[in-house]
Image (spheres, coloured by chain):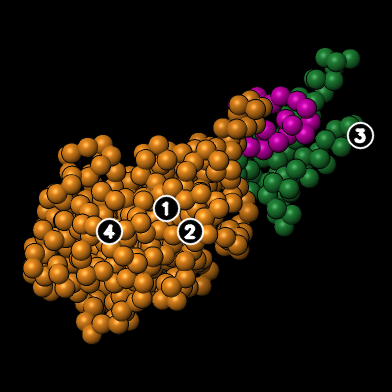
Amino acid sequence: MGVISPYGVGSDLLWAKLIQGKNAIRVINSFDTSHIRCRVGGQLVDFRPEDYLPPRMIRKIDRFSVFGLIAVQHALQDAGLLLSNQKPVWSEQKIGDNRVGITVGNNLGGWEFAERELFNLWKNGPRDVSPYMATAWFPAAVQGNVSIQFGIKGVGRTFLSDRASSAHALMHAADCLKRGNADIMIAGGTEAPFAPYAALCYQTSNLMSEQDANIKEPAYRPFDQNHDGLVMAEGAAFFVLEREEDAQRRGAPFLAKLKSWSSTHDGFDAIHPRPDGKCYAASITQTLQRASLSPSEVDCVFAAGSAIPAEDISETCAIRLALGYDASHIPVTAPKSAFGNLFGAAFALDMAIVILAMGRRVIPATLHLNQPAKGCDLEYVARHPRQVERLDNCLLNARGIGGVNASMLIQRPF
Amino acid sequence: MTTHEINIAKRVYEILHEHLGSHTTVLPESDLLNDLGMDSLEQVELALKLEKDFSIKIPIEDLRNCVTVEEVIEIVQRTASHKESKNA
């Protein structure tokens, strides 16, 4: 896997900071935030794209593509699919590149690039606009850039479903493998929301937290009594997916098994979730049924944990509905509380954390969860990580604006 | 080639090196796409840079028809001299 989180580049760094309980949320300083109410976020600082990519390439792409390209490169490296010249193994094969695919979850597109060029357009006219506008800003740009960079000629899809985008990207990638449409799928998500217009789009949804620049301790608070909405974050996470037998045959490092998945819609409201969580529960139940697992066999729930009060309560309802009696004792956590919500990349980064957690049998904590909110009464792993004897079956959830729900059962490799 | 044309050629090489990186070998016969890896968008970007630097207007289509560096230089020389003769 390849990971870029608000802590920096790499999965080891992500895990170390999470376990140390480091809060990556700080006052936004990359643009003037006077037009928005949430002025804090999980912003990657001291990040130098030129340490990873040639300047000539950086000039042509947005920050979300930069994240995507670096994360994919790390994922391929991690999976043993890069040659010493940093090209993928299929670049030296006569056939095979059309059996490699890419799916990307993203929500906002490349607004840092787009806003800069729009400013140039209004200020100086069309001849001052970068010609790369055509390929830099739209959400599918990452899919294109990655496929060009790594010579991927098979399936290519980009998914936009708000905070469930990368869940759908990973689900589709796994489906492609199951159906035999590809042999290797690179899947994940990327998001770079720190731009004035992009931030404003979320602001107008009225789902953002209200923490101004003078706040002493900026925080993202899923399920806490002081939860007041989303806190945005940036980064990316990508994975190399293969059929189990293919991965075993080539001796690939085996991180986890995507056992089953499901997605439903509330069909309720453009912004708010269905309060009773019934459709969300259906997504969880279908996922467990497809894995032939009973609720008692779930070792941990990694919640969507949006910190939007109505969503936290309806998610709690959904988990209770789906897991029944067992919901009272199955640990529930939302590690994104430490760094913010990566929107279109949120599920992918959560999946990276699930994989890291399963390997160590440690459940990372929900930071800033001091007192659960009324209506939030699950077995939360609050403030401190928890060592457990068994962490083999993890349920990972995501949901997004418009009532999209997604669940996946991730198994520890044996 | 006049001194003015030579100076234009020198400046085009400088701009190309700024654009592609100083380590890139740029020759008159260098193919924009195959040798220098400049796709159509990058050629437009180059055209805009040349326009700004020489205070001229280069029809994007003309530049897109260029295959080699030499042809780019010729377009700039031609456009610059056309501008000067108009101004004279």
Mark number, residue A373:
4
- Bounds of the magenta segment: B45-64
Please give the chain letter of the residue carrying mark 2: A
Q: Are discs 3 and 1 less than 8 Å apart at CB? A: no
Q: Which chain is green?
A: B
Residue flagged by tag 2: what amino acid is it? Pro
Q: Chain of mark 4?
A: A
Question: In the image, are marks 3 and 1 on the same chain?
Answer: no
The residue closer to the viewer here, A246 or A42, is: A42
Label 2 residue SS: loop
Give the chain letter for orange.
A
Q: Amino acid at mark 1?
A: Val
* Mark 3 and mark 4 on one chain: no
Q: Residue furthest bottom?
A: A389
The vertical placement of A158 against A226, above or below, is above
Q: Chain of mark 1?
A: A
Q: CA distance from mark 2 to mark 4?
A: 18 Å
Residue at the disc numbered 1: A231
Q: Residue at x 35, y 55 (%)?
A: A227
State the CA–CA distance, disc 4 to disc 1.
Answer: 18 Å
State whether the magenta stretch is mostly helix, strand or loop. Answer: helix
Q: From the viewer's perspective, is the residue at label 3 or at label 2 nearer?
A: 2
The answer to the question of whether label 1 and label 2 lie on touching residues, with beta carbons closer than 8 A, is yes
- Whether residue A374 is visible here, answered yes or no, is yes
Q: Amino acid at mark 3?
A: Thr
Q: Are marks 3 and 2 on the same chain?
A: no
Location of residue A350 by image quarter? bottom left
Alpha carbon of mark 3 to alpha carbon of mark 2: how far? 63 Å
- Name the residue that disc number 3 marks: B3
